[in-house]
Amino acid sequence: MTAQPLTDYSRMAVHTFTTKPWNLQQACENYASAGIPGITVWRNVIEDIGAEAAGAMIRKSGLEVAALCRGGFFPATDATQRQAAIDDNKLAIDQAAAIGAPMVVLVCGAVVGMPLEEARKQISDGIGACLDHARACNVQLAIEPLHPMYAADRSAVNTMGQARAICETLNDPLVGIALDVYHVWWDPDLSQEIKRAGEMGTLFAFHVCDWKPDTNHLLLDRGLMGEGCIDIRAIRSEVEAAGFRGWNEVEIFSQHHWEKEQRSWLSEIKRAYLDHV
Amino acid sequence: MTAQPLTDYSRMAVHTFTTKPWNLQQACENYASAGIPGITVWRNVIEDIGAEAAGAMIRKSGLEVAALCRGGFFPATDATQRQAAIDDNKLAIDQAAAIGAPMVVLVCGAVVGMPLEEARKQISDGIGACLDHARACNVQLAIEPLHPMYAADRSAVNTMGQARAICETLNDPLVGIALDVYHVWWDPDLSQEIKRAGEMGTLFAFHVCDWKPDTNHLLLDRGLMGEGCIDIRAIRSEVEAAGFRGWNEVEIFSQHHWEKEQRSWLSEIKRAYLDHV
């Protein structure tokens, strides 16, 4: 059954990358004054100011943090690089704790030329190596399956089923899945995997945007909800039927939309959120 | 076990679209004089001259036809369009018979806004409606699963598993699968589905090119074998272990490579074929 349309913004969060031209201060001020209660913080906007100051800034704005983006990129061809990736993920976990983010979203990584199976093993091992630290900080790790067009160099985890397999291997309540409609909408097993994630308690995050049939760039041409072909409300219905009660996070990378005045872009996002999520 | 490198061109076929600047006459002459025995004919190169004349031209060149590309595009929002698609596929079957192509490759289609499940049902029904005609003409129909990045408007069949499901539904020796490494290399179920296709006798065609991690266009930036990250030889090994003895078809859409002098482009292709297929 299709969920009712959303009538308010109480579960809306926006990724700072969605309004890339803004720094964290501008994002906090503008989201808060627009009545958007949630923010997902990308690490680029805390680089300059540090996680402590970022946390103070966000708390002052009254926003709640949905997640920190992003950790991951575990696979590498030598042990030193793999350890560096683990260390960087532990740092991300510290940063998440400092800004009040309940989870770190993982773009798991892939290495050109490395067999995908080997990359997946290194991903599972890498997440496993971060678990003690994540537990100490009380921060969840959300595996985000990425669209197969990113399998070469961004993520060897390309379906909900593969993300589930890693969750099953690690079998830790801190490890779950971030479902982004952009990456998984095409998957014939999507409905079934959402149900299983609900049963397993691994559905940690829900990201929305849209897939434009005339996509002109593999990274930076995502659509605003309603601009493309994804039945976002149908997927939200399934996610909620599976028990998800978290944020509806708007994550849009779009050169085209970033060229707009960002306050009016944020207004468009709010309208599209009620109309299409 | 990895297959031995290829040492000759006896199983090599080239898609006319790989050398798009050439008309059929030029493609036939140049492939034949380069010692390439096989050609896969795209319908655009026979539009002007007709299938009968095209068939005569190809026979005169001594080339063998691996396939006709392409039929498909079955889903549509009204019955008239769906019937038009079926009629066009029957025409493609006639054209295949006229040029001596043993099969028509199907890019199955999708409609923006139509649920993928509905599109898949229309695809299966559409292929089914062509079977009597295909049988009368002794032409096979090869479902080509397309990369999920084409799910919005080109094909709702995006994995070998989905193609198999349609083969199982129709259960006809004329219906099988065209495996293109570009579309399926990322699929965690690839090895298992190749084996099953071998057992079912549905592995009809094998297409090669490469996936470039820095792909800059969703359609027209495929890589020459070796330019990207696909372990083509490993996939050929699996395909051959599953019993495939057909053509290794080179199918590359690339604005970049089409801008080259096409004879030297063909020489590059031949080298890459021995080095990477």
Image: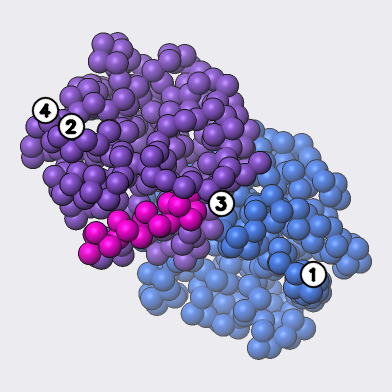
Chain colours: A blue, B purple
Which numbered disc covers residue B59? 2
Within 10 Å of the Cα at label 1, are there few (<14), some (14-19), or many (20+) other Cα atoms?
few
| Helix, strand or loop under label 2 | helix
Q: CA distance from mark 1 to mark 3?
A: 23 Å
Instruction: Name the residue nearer the viewer: A60 or B208.
Output: B208
The reply, left or right, for residue A112 in relation to residue A130 is: left
Q: Earlier in the sequence, mark 4 or mark 3?
A: 4
| Helix, strand or loop under label 1 | helix
Instruction: Name the residue nearer the viewer: B149 or B198.
Output: B198
Q: Position of residue A141 (x, y in %)?
A: 77, 59
Q: Which mark's residue is nearer the viewer, 1 or 4?
A: 4
Q: CA distance from mark 4 to mark 3?
A: 39 Å
Within 10 Å of the Cα at label 4, are there few (<14), some (14-19), or many (20+) other Cα atoms?
some
Q: Which mark's residue is nearer the viewer, 1 or 2?
A: 2
Mark 1 — residue?
A79
| Helix, strand or loop under label 3 | loop
Q: Position of residue B136 (x, y in %)?
A: 26, 11
Q: Position of residue A214 (x, y in %)?
A: 34, 54
| Helix, strand or loop under label 4 | helix
**What amino acid is labelled 3 in the image?**
Asp
Q: Position of residue B191 (x, y in %)?
A: 61, 37
Q: Does residue A114 sit above or below B110 in this rendering?
A: below
User: Do the numbered discs 3 and 2 sit on residues whose CB atoms are within 8 Å?
Assistant: no
Which numbered disc covers residue B202? none
